[in-house]
Amino acid sequence: MSIPTGKILACVNGVIGPAESATVSVLDRGHIFGDGIYEVVRVDKGRLHGIDRHWRRLDRSLRALQMPSLDLNLLRSQVDATLAASGHCDAMVYLQVTRGTAARAHAFPTDTPANTLILVQHFPDDKAALREKGAGVITHPDLRWARCDIKSINLLGSVLAAEAAKRAGCVEAVLIREDGTVTECAHSSLFAVVDGVLRTHPLDNRILPGITREIVLEIAADLGIPCRQKALRSDELRGVEELFLTSTTSKVLPLVTLDGKPVGSGNPGPVTGKLRDAFEAWEKADAQRTPSAAALNAGEL
């Protein structure tokens, strides 16, 4: 099967077909409660980038929410089959797992199997120009729940922040808690350069352990770029030398305006540029590797 660009292919509990004709029960707990988790994986020239890292994070989210047991080897094969059926070489894979279908009640149902959803769609790289010239962001209150380290499908706080950014003509919203702590962005990780040192919020319950974030930190260490995993304060944001975000779909994206005012010189900075270029080199090397199911088969999740 090969589907046209712009069309989305779905795999619901192992059954592959066009997304527009796929269905889930109205009693699915993801639909009713947002009781589920997800992952987004980018595909470049047929290669699922950082896939083993995504599987580890998915497994962590499943465990954190005490989700029903899941055959991850089977799920991996369904992702591969759906991607192959789509015919897309440059794509985005969305993978969702919910607690299953049951009569509406807040407490967990018993002996209810999880529901799985895989979506594959063509995904052109539409941010290449922004990665060169930089983009704008706004600040926004962090309205999310207390377990942002879990990649939950319950995303209303992020949705409201992203919409505010869109209305302001910006690509993202930098989230700030009531105590003035800068956490991350609505759907991206956040980095700054302060006094020549890379800064990002430490891993805890207030931010998502981003896959691209993880890779960028490894690259920074390899390049000898000093880094502190220490949260920024809102009053520090105006004085940062550089600001950039990272995500699966945006990669390493320089931020040159904040609330309409220039960040640093108003141009992508040297540290950001070095990390952006090094990440792209990592991607090229990753694309040449054979997709590995070794971690799954060995149970190394």
Image: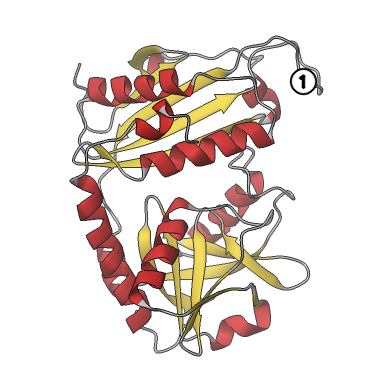
Instruction: Work out which residue is located at the far front of the displayed protein and give it.
Output: 298
- Give left or right: position of 216 versus 165: left
Residue 44: image quadrant is top left
- Give left or right: position of 193 versus 233: left
Residue 178: image quadrant is bottom right
Across and down, in percent, residue 136 comes to: 44, 71
Quarter of the picture containing the N terminus is top left
At horizontal 32% and vertical 44% (from top left) the residue drawn is: 49
Viewer-nearest residue: 77 or 123: 77
At horizontal 61% and vertical 31% (from top left) the residue drawn is: 62
Residue 29: image quadrant is top right
Across and down, in percent, residue 291 comes to: 27, 36
Residue indicated by mark 1: 108
Q: Amino acid at mark 1?
A: Phe
- Give left or right: position of 240 versus 68: left
Question: Which of the colour schemes (rainbow, by chain, secondary structure, one colour) is used?
Answer: secondary structure
At horizontal 36% and vertical 64% (from top left) the residue drawn is: 252
Across and down, in percent, residue 278 comes to: 28, 67
Q: Is residue 244 visible?
A: yes
- Give left or right: position of 158 versus 42: right
